[in-house]
Amino acid sequence: MRTDILGVGFDDLTLAEASTAGAALTEAEGFHYAVTPNPEFILAARKDPAFRQVLLGADLVLADGVGIVYSAKILGRPLKGRVPGIEFAQRLVSWMAAHGKRLFLLGAKPGVAELAAARLKASQPNLIVCGTHDGYFKEDAPVVEAIRAAAADVVFVCLGAPKQEFWMAKNGPATGAHLMVGLGGSLDVFAGVVDRAPAGFQKLGLEWLYRLMKEPKRAGRMARLPLVLAYALGERMGGK
Ligand code: UDP
């Protein structure tokens, strides 16, 4: 049973439980995909029923960020905690390195995925990165074919939302991969192109504040976070 937060169902898992679930999906027959919604996703899904369906259709829906955790609390349906997509990805990478699974990195500007691959391999020498591709392609078919030819088990799809979620749902089954994870700007972080917030910010759940300080032009997008909390409060007071 999923925990409904304003129309999107979340899996109530700790980071460790989510990683175990991701590993199990990688081992399972067939294609699966995981999404990591933050408050912006929820607002987008309220406006776009097709996006909401793609989120609901995911095999794993992880609460990426403190905004989701607060909303859950306000709604009276607390979650165990947040599961930042990037930390989920790091754990999955360790597991893949230990189990000989093949990782394909898709997304970001040309050259970033290769850099991310090199840095991931430096920290996990046994990791098999079977291929990379940038996120600025016109045709899907050659990318699908590249993933299939690389015999990838897992693909990190980093095209930004909602593009990456639509891409996974549409193209995933044809690639032969077992698990795709939509991870936004994570390849930039793995590549070292963008820094993650310092540990103090991470611990307090204030990564969004750090990003805002670094990139003030994100202010417009981030103003939507309080809006989600207001919707949650409205729903709670409405007695739903
Ligand atoms: N991106 C991409 N293809 C596109 C648009 C974006 O590969 O057509 C990449 C972009 O280079 C960045 C990532 O998607 O690495 C996510 O960007 P953003 O920080 O906007 O996403 P968020 O993490 O906030 O979801």
Image (spheres, rainbow, N blue to C red):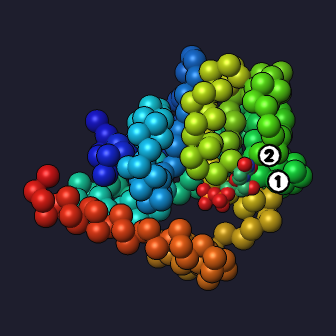
User: Residue 157, located in which quarter of the rendered image?
Assistant: top right
User: Residue 9, located in which quarter of the rendered image?
Assistant: top left
Picture coordinates of residue 158, whole percent (x, y): 68, 47
Give above or below for 197 relative to 14: below
Query: From mark 1 to mark 2, how far is it between C-alphas?
Result: 7 Å
Disc 2 residue type?
Tyr
Disc 1 residue type?
Lys
Instruction: Say which mark, if any, is on residue 109.
Output: 1
Q: Is residue 218 left or right of residue 158?
A: left
Picture coordinates of residue 218, whole percent (x, y): 60, 73
The front one of 141 and 150 is: 141
Disc 1: residue Cβ within 8 A of ligand 1's nearest atom: yes
The front one of 175 and 25 is: 175
Q: Which residue is mark 2?
A: 136
Mark 1 and mark 2 lie on one chain; the one further toward the N terminus is 1
The residue at the point 78 percent across, 24 percent down is: 141
The residue at the point 67 percent across, 80 percent down is: 214
Picture coordinates of residue 78, whole percent (x, y): 27, 57
Is residue 144 visible in the rendered image? The answer is yes
Picture coordinates of residue 154, whole percent (x, y): 68, 33
**Secondary structure under badge 1?**
loop
In the rendered image, the residue lying farthest to the front is 47
Is the Cβ of the residue at disc 1 closer than 8 Å to that at disc 2? Answer: yes
